[in-house]
Amino acid sequence: MRPLLAFLARTRDGRRVGWVDAFSYLYLALGVFLMFGPVAWLVLSSFKSQADLVRFPPSLLPHAQETVTLAGFDQKLPLFRVTLPDGSEKTMAQLRRIGLRAEMVDPENPKDIVRVDIDQRREISRLHFEIDNYLTPLERFNFLTYFKNSVVVTVVATLLTLLVNSMAAFALSKYRFRGAKTFFVVMIGTLMIPITVVLVPVYLVVAKLGLINNLWGVILPGAATPTGVFLLRQYMLTIPDELIEAARMDAASEWRIYWRIMLPLSAPALAVLAIFSVVWRWNDFLWPLVVLSRSEVFTLQVGLNAFQGELNTQWHYLLAMTVVTLLPITAVFAFLQRYITTGIAATGMK
């Protein structure tokens, strides 16, 4: 703890806090707020009840209204702080609300009903984390099946992406053949084509192959990405050609050169591409939604769509399950994030 405090208390000249230090800390604090504020809001909102989510004005922390059980009433009654005509305040339970009026009773004397304007009562609430937002969907929601499908799609697609893109990058960076630069420029040019333009042609190909409602129909179309080829090619260009020539003089085959020399030396770039691929595949929603229509092959992102109906959206369950789906991708990023800076800097992809 002491080293952390010493680090946070560092100043530019090592003695007093100047305007440069104040501006730097203000800038960093703003960046932290912009980056983590929405995530914190999402996590805290996932513990709110349906009524608390639509409360106005909204609150950052989850709250629940205090209730009381009275004799003669089957359900618990919500408690309010009511301002009486003489100006005094009293804690009362609400029986019902009729328009702009509410019928209230004193919990100590529930026989006397008092009618007040709704503006004269103030809700009594307390800090409360709604754990059922997580437990109920996990019982009713086919979470494990969707989670397994997402893991299969993410892992297999990432391995295929690394293999296919690294082989293409190896060919484009270390082989000299006619049209190599033209092929590379055309491939990079495909980055400007939005996925919505190629959605129908790709769907027709997948349907022709009989991969509709099959996880391979989600995995295969995105195995080769121009971004991945570009990233790996730029990194492989930095590997000396003398290593490859020396391997060929030792009678190493082209596959052996690729597998035993190029791939190990390209580990930082491969790690960066692996992180990108995991993020892309785990968060992918549009393409799985188009290809998959049977619930047993849904991925998590498509399964979350089940909480959204035509007339009503169960936001409290949707937010809670969204937090659950964020946990694996956060863990992957936390373990591999140290490769991102070195990998991106080495490939020139800024």
Image: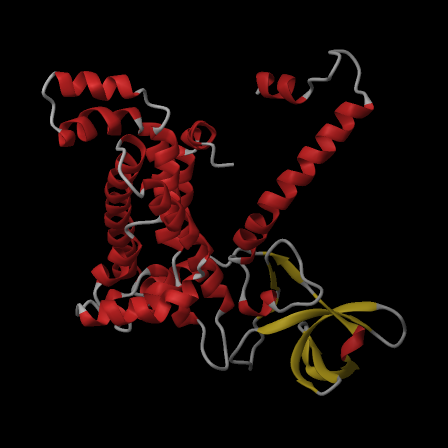
Q: How is the image coloured?
A: secondary structure
Pick the front one: 121 or 291: 291
Q: Residue furthest right?
A: 86
Task: Using the rendered image of the protein, determine whether residue 4 is visible from the camera's viewpoint.
Answer: yes
Q: Residue furthest top?
A: 14
Please state the horizontal and vertical placement of residue 199, each as a whole percent of the image: 36, 67
Quadrant for residue 267, please give it: top left
Quadrant for residue 118, please give it: bottom right
Please state the horizontal and vertical placement of residue 134, each as a whole percent of the image: 42, 58
Residue 169 is left or right of residue 350, and the answer is left
Please state the horizontal and vertical placement of residue 42, each as a whole percent of the image: 54, 54
Task: Using the rendered image of the protein, determine whether residue 279 is visible from the camera's viewpoint.
Answer: no
Residue at (35, 35) in percent of width and height:
233
Q: Is residue 244 depicted above or below 155 in this figure? A: above
Quadrant for residue 125, please give it: bottom right
Q: Residue furthest bottom?
A: 98
Residue 113 is left or right of residue 131, and the answer is right
Residue at (24, 39) in percent of width and height:
167
Please state the horizontal and vertical placement of residue 317, each as a whole percent of the image: 45, 64
Residue at (47, 32) in percent of width and height:
348
Q: Residue furthest front?
A: 178
Q: Is residue 210 depicted above or below 233 in this figure? A: below
Q: Is residue 170 depicted above or below 146 in this figure? A: above
Q: Quadrant of the N terminus?
A: top right
Residue 178 is left or right of residue 336, and the answer is left
Pick the front one: 161 or 3: 161
